[in-house]
Image (cartoon, rainbow, N blue to C red):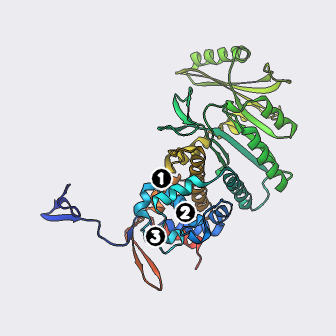
Amino acid sequence: MTNCTSNLIEFSPLNRKKVLGNFNGGSITSDAGLLLLREVDKKCNLTTRLSKVMRDDRAAGMVDHTMLDMLRQRVYALAAGYEDINDHQVLREDVCFQTAVSRERLLASPPTLSRFENALDRESMFKMSEILVEHFIERQITAPNELILDFDPTDHRLHGHQDKRHYHGYYEEYCYLPLHVFCGDHLLVSYLRPSDIDGAKHAGVILRWLVNRFKKVWPNVKITFRGDSAFARKRILHWCEFNNITYIVGLSGNARLYKMVEALEKQAEEQYKETQIKQRLFFDGQYQAGTWKIARRVVAKLEHHDQGSNRRFIVTNQAAEIPAENVYDHDYCPRGEMENKIKQLKLDLSSDRNSCSDFLANQFRVLLSSIAYILITELQYQCLSETELKKSYCGTIRLKLFKIGAIILKNTRRIQILFSSHYPYQATFNIAARNLVPT
């Protein structure tokens, strides 16, 4: 492929015919499917509510781009895969993006969006986090019998000299250490933290806030706190016991725990040598760490296979009648699915693009990606439960539903979106559209 002129692109020929291209096609979009996201957002009223709690110190008479417009512009662009603010220099002229944002003029420029991101204060972002939790509550058609709250930290690698940047020994990089909380597929909390802290920092406060809110709405709901060994902190465990909250938390091994399971571990090894079949044995007993005031139930999985031994410990206050294998396999291991959701936030929605100098601006960027995630999962929940996309990741939904080529015809009376005749997922798109905008 070679450039013939500044506008013309000449590709290799086909059957002696020249194949030429340029970017003078007019009003054509590659993201026509974002209109679905617009309808989902309108139906659940999410960005509208969020914008109302965002502090705006601008002079009202001088404002051209409202907080709602800019919030939608950034969130929809993230959903479409445009994480860089500089992308908006061109995207702001896309009529489909303008229509999705519900605006018929140029969208905000990169400098305006940069000021927008850096203007939000901590109070506004806390109120936005409250609205995300309220949105989850409103989604529940009936009172749930049980809520399992999955807590997990992750790393956001930093490449500059951002505010509160620190080196983390475990991840071996300069990074932030955000905390995410999920309930099933639903994202409840995305909280950015510096990395020079304990992995459970502020988890107890967030847990208490969520439990109090959910108990106020559903007094009889059973709540389970689940996390890896970073959250096996005495204060969190004690608070759960005092407030009748079930916990299932990973536990780091130590010499005492290894001694307690030594016999079972040896038994698993011997059985593997005899059968050459992977062996899994479970320990169930009481253990009291040096900082604990009481002994607690500890379950251990002892595994031996061709790669050697593998042992895992968890601490729980579940009833002793529940077998150790069930506690581990059915109650603890499903938390691993949360890691896939965090990957979607980072890989599909760029929540780790924390390149602002200011820490609060980076917290806002994490929230923007979280809002995009919630809207996409809302689309799945409302429209795609009977389609092949019912369990798809955000990136797959973007590729198959948002990335649609279309010609846009606009006049004083209407805006026509002429989708590609050869778009392969027309049936799925039509199902979603009918659910969102019934005729």
Q: Which numbered tag is attached to residue 70? A: 2
> Circles 3 and 1: CB distance less than 8 Å?
no
Split into 4 quadrants, where in the image is the C terminus? bottom right
- The Cα atoms of the two marked residues, 3 and 1, are separated by 19 Å
Q: Which numbered tag is attached to residue 83? A: 1
Q: Which numbered tag is attached to residue 106? A: 3
Q: Is residue 263 above or below residue 387?
A: above
Compare marks 2 and 3 and give the one earlier in the sequence.
2
The amino acid sitting under disc 3 is Leu
Which mark is in front, 3 or 1?
3
Q: Is residue 386 above or below residue 129?
A: below
The amino acid sitting under disc 2 is Met
Compare marks 3 and 1 and give the one earlier in the sequence.
1
Q: Is residue 369 left or right of residue 254?
A: left
The amino acid sitting under disc 1 is Glu
- For disc 1, the neighbor class at 10 Å (few under 14, some 14 to 19, many from 20) is many
